[in-house]
Amino acid sequence: MIKGIHHVTAMTGNIRKNIRFYTEILGLRFVKKTVNHDSPDIWLFYFGDATGSPGSVITFSPFPGIPRGQSGVGSTSVTGFSVGADALDFWKKRLKEYQVEFRGPFRRFDESYFTLYDLDGMELELVASPNDPRQGVETPGIKGENAIKGLSHVELTCSIADKTAFFLVNVLEHKRLIEENDRIRLYSGEALPGNFVDLVSKPSLPHHKGGIGMVHHVAFSTPDLETQKQIRDRLSKTGIQVSQPADRQYFHSVFFRDPGGILFEIATLGPGFLTDETPETLGQSLKLPDWMEPEREKIEAMLPPLD
């Protein structure tokens, strides 16, 4: 029922710098420009592959007035992106060129990776993935073989990783793939990049603090509304409180927290980001759900300028 990661949603303190980092430096496509459905005076941006395929997308909203967050127990502490098997040399040069802080390469699970930080201090990884069949977005400065292919994994910081693993395996049908030191790697769907969840036990850390530079939630993919309902019913039977289904325009979603307090979303694969734009025009104009269109002029006046 779960088919890998759908997207990751995080918070930024400066949307202009955020757009530049993820599109100009990392080379992701600006897939969608819309607003928070609950607070339409707040931008919501989607970055991903050429069409915003599930498993490629990271989303941000700006909250310039709140403090920077702090990673800790109960957080999604790392967001990983997948690149080609031989792409790390390219990225080493590119990150230096753009003065992006990074460390590595390191080795883990027979993979090489860099750790880097975006302009809000959010921790990312670029993972060389020889078995990732996806195609990245070629840009003037990034050839296809070096482009980011999509998400690789997320890392969850837990007090006891085995407890989180028990929940994900027995309730959300993840499978154990491999363990190394204090890290457990799970997957859903196929054992491929974009479907991995890494669990790390760090019981000595304090509980995380939400804020700028932190992941707000991780969304998992499910095929359709029927499978989403099955997952929602299963969660409810285990005592997990689940939100009512919501139409997010490009997918339908429900939210819940696992027993460790980590916020997750279950998002349907469709209808997708091409429902209101063509592949050529993705991300070029502000898109609103139909029920907000009568208020477009008012909403546009409330939104902070992007230039």
Image (cartoon, rainbow, N blue to C red):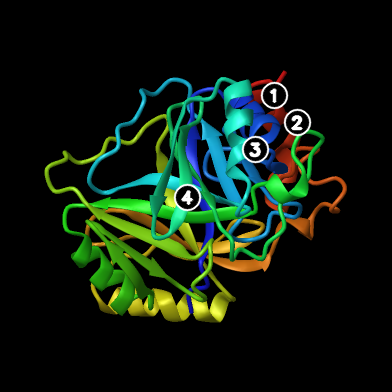
Packing grade of label 2 (10 A; few <14, some 14-19, many >=20) is few
Q: Amino acid at mark 1?
A: Ala
Label 2 to label 4: alpha-carbon separation: 49 Å
Which residue is depicted at the point 65% across and 44% down? 47
For residue 112, which numbered disc appears in the image? 4
Do the CB atoms of the residues marked 1 and 2 lie less than 8 Å apart?
Answer: yes
- Between 300 and 256, the residue placed more toward the observer is 256
Which residue is depicted at the point 77% across and 33% down? 141
Q: Count numbered badges in the picture.
A: 4
Q: Amino acid at mark 4?
A: Ser
User: Can you tell which of label 2 and label 3 is closer to the viewer?
Assistant: 3
For residue 90, which numbered disc appears in the image? 3
Q: Which residue is mark 2?
A: 297
User: Can you tell which of label 1 and label 4 is closer to the viewer?
Assistant: 4
Residue 232: image x %, image y %? 40, 74
Packing grade of label 1 (10 A; few <14, some 14-19, many >=20) is few
Give the mark, 4 or 3, whose residue is nearer the N terminus.
3
Residue 100: image x %, image y %? 53, 25
Packing grade of label 4 (10 A; few <14, some 14-19, many >=20) is some
